[in-house]
Image (cartoon, rainbow, N blue to C red):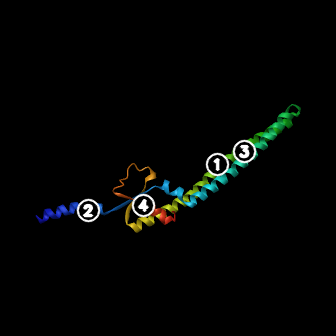
Amino acid sequence: MKKILLAALLMLAPFYTFAQQKFGHFSMAEIVPSMPEYTTAQAELQKLGEQYEADIKRMQDEFQKKYEEYQKEQANLLDNVRQRREAELQDLSQRIQQSAQDNQQAFEKARTEKLQVIYEKVNTAVKKIGDEGNYVYIMDTSAGIPYISTKLSTDVSADIKNALGIK
């Protein structure tokens, strides 16, 4: 009888241990926009985007001006001058396209770098909450997890916000 009781207890031990485990959840999509760093990053990115747009606009205006001048003078130009002007316009058009691509890549790089710093800060706070609260897992609900039981998991969003100094 003792052996049966001991075997039953040993079989139930993992379930008891599992029941003792703490699980948490939060939404990165909810926390990040409330961070002052995010607001600052968004403002900096908007300013950078506007600067890139102004650069491209300036280049396009220059192209348009040269193109209009070329069209006015085209009939009176010698062939070699006309070909040189067309080559200049083609070169300017290619530089505009290359600048637009370079600006887009630089913008995406800046965006990624700024957001990475913010995500790292949130992840550090999550780890801190996890260690302090003895959580086994803390899951990000905005990461596409199909289901998290709010009865068996604790919402630690407020704790993360406190750790980040967000009110």
Residue carrying label 3? 96
* Residue 85 sits in quarter: top right
Any mark on residue 104, and which? Answer: 1
Q: Position of residue 131 (x, y in %)?
A: 41, 67
Q: Give the residue type at disc 2.
A: Tyr
- Give the mark, 2 or 4, whose residue is nearer the N terminus: 2
Q: Which residue is mark 2?
A: 16
Q: Are marks 3 and 1 in contact (CB under 8 Å)?
A: no
SS assignment at label 3: helix
**Mark 1 and mark 4: Cα distance apart in space:** 37 Å
Separation of marks 3 and 2 at Cα, in angstroms: 66 Å
Farthest-out residue, bottom:
132
CA–CA distance between discs 2 and 4?
23 Å
Instruction: Name the quadrant containing residue 22.
Output: bottom left
- Mark 2 packing: few (<14 Cα in 10 Å), some, or many (20+)? few
3D distance between C-alphas at marks 3 and 1: 12 Å
Q: Which residue is mark 4?
A: 156
Instruction: Please tell me whether mark 4 sits on a helix, a strand or a loop.
Output: loop
- Residue 124: percent from left, percent from top: 48, 64
Q: Are marks 1 and 2 in contact (CB under 8 Å)?
A: no
CB within 8 Å, label 3 to label 2: no
Q: Nearer the viewer, mark 1 or mark 4?
A: 4
Number of residues whose C-alpha sits closer than 10 Å to that of mark 1, classed few (under 14), some (14–19) or many (20 or more): some
Circle 1: residue type: Gln
Q: Is residue 166 left or right of residue 84?
A: left
